[in-house]
Image: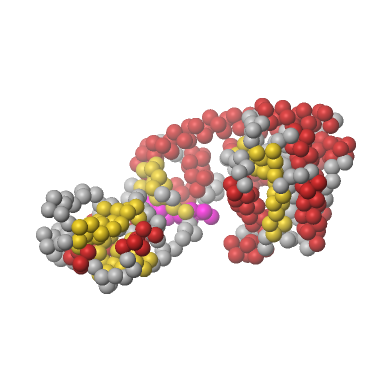
Amino acid sequence: MDFTLFEEFRSFIIENNLFGSDKRVLLAVSGGIDSMVMSHLFLKLGTKIGIAHCNFCLRDGESDKDEELVKSYSDKNGVPFYTRRFNTKEYSKKNGISVQMAARELRYSWFENVRIENGFDFIAVAHNLNDNIETLLINLIRGTGITGLSGMRPVSGKIIRPLLFASRRKIEDYCNENRVPFREDRSNAETRYTRNKMRHLILPLLKEINPSIEETLTETANKLAGIDEIVSDYINGILKQLSVKKGETIIFNIEKLNDLKPGKALIFELFSPFGITGATSGDLIKVLGGNSGKQIFTRTHRMIRSRNDLIIAPIGAKKHENYRINSPEDLLLIPGIVSAGIVTRELDFKLPDNQKIACIDFEKVKFPLMIRAWESGDYFFPLGMNSKKKLSDYFIDRKYSLADKEKALVLESENNIVWIIGERLDERFKVTGSTSSILQIETGDRVNC
């Protein structure tokens, strides 16, 4: 059994091209049987590894004993050990998510930080064949698309799953034969959690109907994974035709989308990455057919109809801050400002024909300057005009979408708007024939404030 599982482990890595022999792999080890067996197999393989352990502080002294076991095992085998304690319940409460989801977010974020900081190429997690089947069935019960029925993948970015081929029974046999130390999480036997209900109650019943249920579902998932690749290629092609990305915002052309006569299935596949579910796909269809300004929210994104565009932006984004600018040099500290400085006006000086470059009469501004989000009631004198105009009216004239208006920032001097950043200068601060010094500022695609 030792030889069989190890050889399967090595073959699975090669067949799925998980990593090369020169790569360094960070193992996510909880102290449970799956991750401890994974560690044993990696040590036998001779790969350069490190071990990372999360202490979620959820089981009092039991959590500390898990950490002690993993640390002792790492030290005994000369493996670099990384650990961190989390206040998981506090994080769960603060973010309005379940404790299980909180633990997931915390561990994967921390694993990635450890990977980058310590030069590892991949993160290995110990999901096995049974975990994959349970995930498939849970997704099916909750409602999902083809991707959810395809199960876990051996490779997901920097995450690899080298035990995905192994049944829980094989892992247990290997553990017993090789006397691999591990700790049992007593909560795994409880049936109040969805996964445990699936493991201890539902799968045994399915096995009575089909004794080969594990193999059957695995084969089905593999077939669906192949179909999912075909569908994904099709969906990605549509996305390229219908949408453009501006920073964190995605803009869809509704007219082109409607030409496809999309039903709920296509809407789900296109927009599920933004939090749309089977249940909410109908709501999105109503937004697509509604008036400008109609919107819906998913758990992760806001979707707004703006004229012929559907604008998708992540929610919970950082709120605008006010930046106080005490000198031209301070402008360089602001994300999105490419360059800033004082330019002496020469006779052959030409104003750049670029909205993202502002040339301001330096003597007409007074420090400290301010960069802030625009507000209702703000007005300025658009370059080339001698009358003032409300910014709200200006944005309407310029056909700004709701999302564009929310991101608009202004440069201010003594409560006077100098520049709608990246858009238009105020007439009062323009460079004239009498200007001797110019404050020149260049922005990138967007100034983040």
Which of 164/260 is in front? 164
Q: Is residue 206 left or right of residue 435?
A: right
Question: Magenta residues?
Answer: 294-306
Number of numbered discs present? Answer: 0
Tell me what residue is drawn at x 20 percent, y 67 percent.
363
Residue 406 occupies which quadrant of the picture? bottom left
Name the spot of residue 58 as percent of width and height, x first: 74, 60
Q: Is residue 353 left or right of residue 209?
A: left
Name the spot of residue 401 as percent of width and height, x first: 33, 54
Q: Is residue 304 magenta?
A: yes
How would you classify the magenta stretch by its main secondary structure? strand
The outermost residue toward the bottom is: 414
Q: Is residue 263 left or right of residue 387?
A: right
Residue 414 occupies which quadrant of the picture? bottom left
Tell me what residue is drawn at x 76 percent, y 41 percent.
39
Q: Is residue 87 magenta?
A: no
Name the spot of residue 143 as percent of width and height, x first: 61, 45
Task: Identify whether 383 is placed above or below 326.
Answer: above
Of the 4 image quadrants, the one containing the N terminus is top right
Name the spot of residue 365 as percent of width and height, x first: 24, 68
Residue 195 visible at all? no
Residue 233 visible at all? yes
